[in-house]
Image (tube, grey):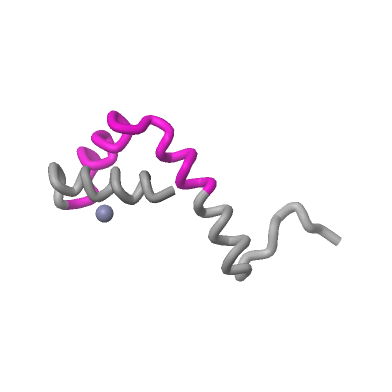
Amino acid sequence: MHRLCLLHELCHIAEHNHSEKFYRLMNQMMPKWEGMKNKLDAMANLIIGDTLPRSISG
Ligand SMILES: [Zn+2]
């Protein structure tokens, strides 16, 4: 998981902002980073627990 943060920081060496170019660079370095982000978000929701899972209904 730290790899994503490291990649993010590495991309900031080349791009000091979150421009389209920055995300293009991220995609070049690690095409699957977006999927990883989704996983991280899901994990964060579980840990923080401030969002109820959508699967629970009724
Ligand atoms: Zn950043």
User: From this viewpoint, which residue is outermost toward the front?
Assistant: 2
Is 38 positioned to the left or the right of 56 in the image?
Answer: left
Residue 32: in magenta span = yes
Give the main secondary structure of the magenta stretch. Answer: helix
Q: Is residue 11 left or right of residue 32?
A: left
Percent position (x, y) of residue 57?
81, 58
- Please tell me whether residue 2 is drawn above or below residue 46 in the rendered image: above
Compared with 49, 14 (above or below) is: above
Residue sitting at x 48%, y 39%: 35
- Residue at 29% across / 37% down in the picture? 26
53 lies above or below 22: below
At 69% from the left and 58% from the top, the residue drawn is 53
Residue 44 at x, y percent in the picture: 54, 60
Position of the C terminus, as image quadrant, is: bottom right
**For the magenta stretch, what is the residue range?**
17-39
In this orientation, which residue lies closer to the viewer: 8 or 1?
Answer: 1
The x and y percentages for residue 9 are: 24, 50
Q: How many marks?
A: 0
Quadrant hosting ligand 1: bottom left
Residue at the far right in the pictured view? 58
Closer to the camera in the image, 11 or 22: 11
Name the spot of residue 24 as percent of width and height, x first: 26, 34
Q: Is residue 14 left or right of residue 30?
A: left
Q: At 38% from the left edge and 50% from the top edge, which residue is drawn?
A: 2
Q: Is residue 21 magenta?
A: yes
Residue 15 located left or right of residue 46: left
37 vs 4, nearest the viewer:
4
Q: Nearer the viewer, residue 54 or 36?
A: 36
